[in-house]
Amino acid sequence: DDNSIEGARRYVKQVIGSKRWATLALRYDYPSSNITIAVKDGRGRRSACASTWRVSLPVHTRSKPIILHELAHTLTNHQRKLPGHGWLFCRAYLDLVSTFIGADAKKKLKASFRDHKVKTNPKRSNA
């Protein structure tokens, strides 16, 4: 896999340019479905981070699952009343993993969420 910042930028562009991203942007009430997310190299950071319009990715975090994790934050960060890794974020992450990595990866992630009692619905106790 290409762990260059250019490779990460291409992947983010592919994801946010997809029809699925547009659908998810509407679902999660994202501020704009026609946007550009800046992808920074994250130099000097220990971990990846994201805001509504930017993702910072140190070299060791440039894998598809981590990039999708950060993009799930971009979809849900504007929902300030909800925790950063709360049920809405987890649901968005499952949606992204399902579409951009595949059904098997989603199944494993969902099982892990269940095992760790991670919520993906505000009314249920687990995935």
Image (spheres, helix red, strand yellow):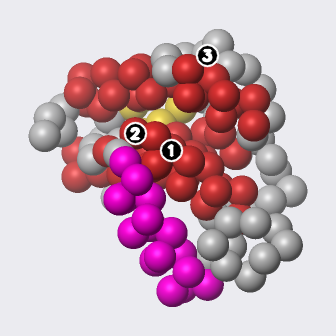
Q: Position of residue 97 (x, y in %)?
A: 44, 49
Question: In the rendered image, which quarter is residue 104 located in?
Answer: bottom left
Up-down relation of residue 52 to residue 72 (above or below): above
Q: Cα distance, mark 2 to mark 1?
A: 6 Å
Residue drawn 64% across the image and 56% down it? 91
Residue numbers of the magenta segment = 102-117
Give the residue number, with chain letter if any, for mark 3. 35
Residue furthest to the front in view is 103
Residue furthest to the top in view is 34
Q: Along the horizontal axis of the image, is 126 left or right of 109?
A: right
Q: Confirm or deny contact between disc 2 and disc 1 (CB under 8 A).
A: yes
Q: Nearer the viewer, residue 124 or 54?
A: 124
Question: In the rendered image, which quarter is residue 39 located in?
Answer: top left
Task: Judge whether residue 45 is colored magenta.
Answer: no
Q: Cα distance, mark 1 to mark 3?
A: 17 Å
Task: Judge whether residue 114 is colored magenta.
Answer: yes
Evaluate whether residue 67 shows in this view. no
